[in-house]
Image: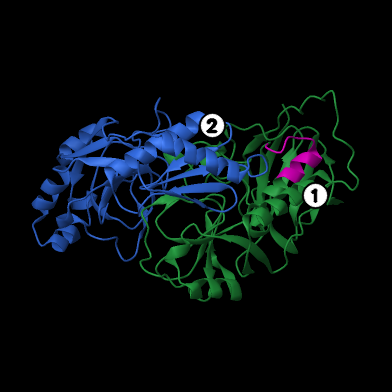
């Protein structure tokens, strides 16, 4: 059981807020709560979104009374037993680090005061957890990045980041699914597509999954693309 | 099947229904109309359900040609509309005859209009919706704005039901489209404690201006900066329409229909649902004044607005 409060996010959404920290168990509880809301209140709620330490439920205020919904969500939340953080699959993501694919690898190395090879070894040597999907279709917020390579966001974002770019921003890392503006430090590129509408399952990641990056050569990248 | 051919697309014309709900948890934006009131109204006048796909037209309207008779209705920004150079009405159904051209001319007031056609636009519906999300490239025509040469299929009119709507006293009442700016009511939060009391005074006592860096995702606003009580970052969470997020610069951003599903900036307040249509009618250079509102008053305002849509003002 975690401490939470329920806040209005406007007149059409309720926001379940847990203490703001990156915590696997808290996030696993949020995933469980979102699933329960979906199962129990699916007809009353039109979207449920998991954040790092939040669950947001969207509803139509002309048909659903916010006070009633808040009460229902509180009851559901109280009924969630202690969760374990062991759900989700393991997804391997091969990355060609550095060079033209990773223009910010040098900056991340400088941030930690260690060679680029160390950045690669540390980034690919850490098992990450998917905390939430957001921003654009299929973008997974992965944490937690080792402090030695946790370089902050860039001062000004790039206008367009190539799809498949693997990037770091503080404690978070992720894979850009599509060409979007982006302010994270780009350290490499993967041939894997987090979002592919032609796939039977268009979204590769879901909250609770584990992700491990592995280093591949430019030749292997070309063969896999 | 009847269809409309795009002769000139206008500045930014997109197909929209009431949005792609249920996939925000996978990062898929809701999208949908910037002015949902006028979207519903145009559809009702055309004889459709509120959720039917219609064309959202921005600032400079398109020119369209019908290949067979199509019943049309327009609501929202006041465009000068013509059918083969003969003026056509807003807020009333009219026939666009086969071969005739529908043109959108001068626009003295408002930013966006909805063109609904009887039967709805029968375009593809990826993930169950015909809304166009430009940010994610999801929707009909690959999630892009219309281009010259695009063909918009028109669906079958919905079958007559065994009952009819109760006759309205006044007919549907158009949105009072703002001229040059508007007041928007907001509910505080959800990150109220991340701002100083002074930030709320500033928010409620200042005028903000919609800058040129504004689009269907959101409006970047110019005006007095809003002060954070501490850091200007949050751990990313969901971002409803109407959220006013405040990055480190203190300059607020009003999130609109094609907003991303989650964000990492604290949100000082959220525009009430009833005032989203007004916000959707703003263009760069227009002003916004924010005023506080409670949740009960917000829902009362929405119910009253829906009554006006029914033609039963309270």
Q: Which residue is mark 1?
A: B308
Q: Which residue is mark 2?
A: A42
Vertical side of B95 occupied by A10: above or below: below
Q: Is residue A190 left or right of residue B237?
A: left
State which region is magenta: B40-51
Vertical side of B122 occupied by B135: above or below: below
- Would you say residue B102 is visible in this rendering? no
Residue at point 46%, 60% (across, down): B191
Chain on which label 2 sits? A
Q: Label 1: state its secondary structure.
A: helix
Q: Is residue B186 left or right of residue A186?
A: right
The N terminus of chain B - image quarter:
top right
Write down which chain is painted green.
B
Query: Where residue A23 appears, x then y in whole percent?
Result: 28, 47
Query: Where residue A171 appears, x then y in whole percent?
Result: 25, 53
Q: Which quadrant would residue A133 be assigned to in this image? A: top left
Query: Where residue A8 appears, x then y in whole percent?
Result: 53, 52
């Amino acid at each position: 059981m975690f401490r939470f409060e329920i806040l209005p996010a406007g007149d059409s959404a309720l926001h379940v807020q847990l203490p703001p920290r990156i915590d696997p168990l808290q996030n696993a509880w949020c995933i469980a709560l979102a699933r329960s809301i979906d199962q129990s209140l699916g007809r009353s709620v039109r979207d449920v979104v998991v954040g790092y330490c939040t669950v947001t439920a969207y509803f139509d205020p002309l048909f659903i009374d916010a006070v009633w919904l808040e009460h229902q969500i509180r009851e559901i939340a109280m009924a969630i037993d202690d969760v374990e953080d062991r759900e989700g699959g393991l997804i391997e993501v091969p990355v060609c680090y550095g060079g033209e694919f990773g223009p910010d690898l040098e900056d991340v190395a400088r941030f930690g005061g260690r060679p680029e090879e160390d950045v690669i070894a540390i980034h690919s040597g850490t098992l990450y957890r998917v905390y939430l999907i957001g921003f654009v279709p299929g973008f997974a917020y992965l944490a937690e990045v080792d402090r030695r390579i946790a370089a902050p966001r860039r001062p000004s974002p790039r206008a367009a980041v190539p799809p498949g770019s693997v990037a770091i921003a503080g404690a978070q890392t992720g894979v850009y699914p599509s060409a979007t503006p982006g302010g994270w430090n780009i350290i490499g590129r993967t041939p894997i597509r987090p979002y592919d509408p032609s796939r039977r399952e268009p979204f590769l990641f879901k909250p609770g999954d584990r992700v491990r990056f592995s280093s591949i050569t430019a030749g292997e990248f070309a063969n896999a693309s | 099947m009847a269809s409309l051919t795009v002769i000139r697309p206008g500045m930014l014309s997109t197909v929209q229904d009431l949005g792609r709900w249920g996939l925000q948890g996978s990062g898929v934006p809701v999208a949908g109309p910037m002015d949902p009131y006028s979207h519903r109204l145009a559809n009702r006048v055309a004889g459709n359900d509120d959720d039917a796909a219609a064309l959202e037209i921005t600032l400079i309207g398109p020119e369209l040609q019908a290949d067979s008779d199509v019943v049309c209705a327009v609501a929202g920004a006041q465009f000068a509309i013509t059918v083969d150079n003969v003026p056509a009405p807003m807020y009333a159904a009219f026939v666009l005859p086969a071969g005739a051209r529908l043109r959108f001319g001068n626009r003295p007031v408002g930013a966006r209009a909805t063109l609904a056609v009887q039967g709805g636009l029968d375009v593809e519906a990826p993930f169950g919706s015909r809304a166009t999300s430009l940010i994610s490239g999801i929707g009909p025509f690959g999630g892009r704005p219309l281009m010259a040469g695009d063909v918009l299929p028109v669906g079958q009119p919905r079958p007559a039901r065994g009952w009819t709507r109760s006759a309205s006293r006044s007919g549907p009442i158009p949105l009072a489209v703002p001229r040059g700016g508007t007041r928007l009511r907001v509910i505080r939060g959800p990150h109220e404690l991340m701002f100083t009391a002074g930030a709320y005074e500033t928010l409620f006592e200042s005028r903000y201006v919609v800058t040129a860096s504004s689009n269907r995702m959101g409006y970047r606003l110019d005006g007095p900066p809003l002060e954070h009580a501490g850091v200007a970052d949050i751990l990313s969470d969901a971002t409803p329409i109407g959220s006013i997020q405040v990055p480190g610069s203190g300059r607020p951003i009003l999130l609109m229909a094609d907003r991303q599903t989650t964000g990492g900036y604290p949100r000082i307040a959220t525009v009430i649902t009833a005032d989203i249509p007004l916000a959707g009618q703003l263009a760069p250079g227009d002003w916004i004044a924010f005023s506080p509102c409670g949740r009960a008053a917000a829902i009362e305002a929405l119910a009253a607005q829906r009554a006006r849509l029914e033609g039963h003002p309270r």
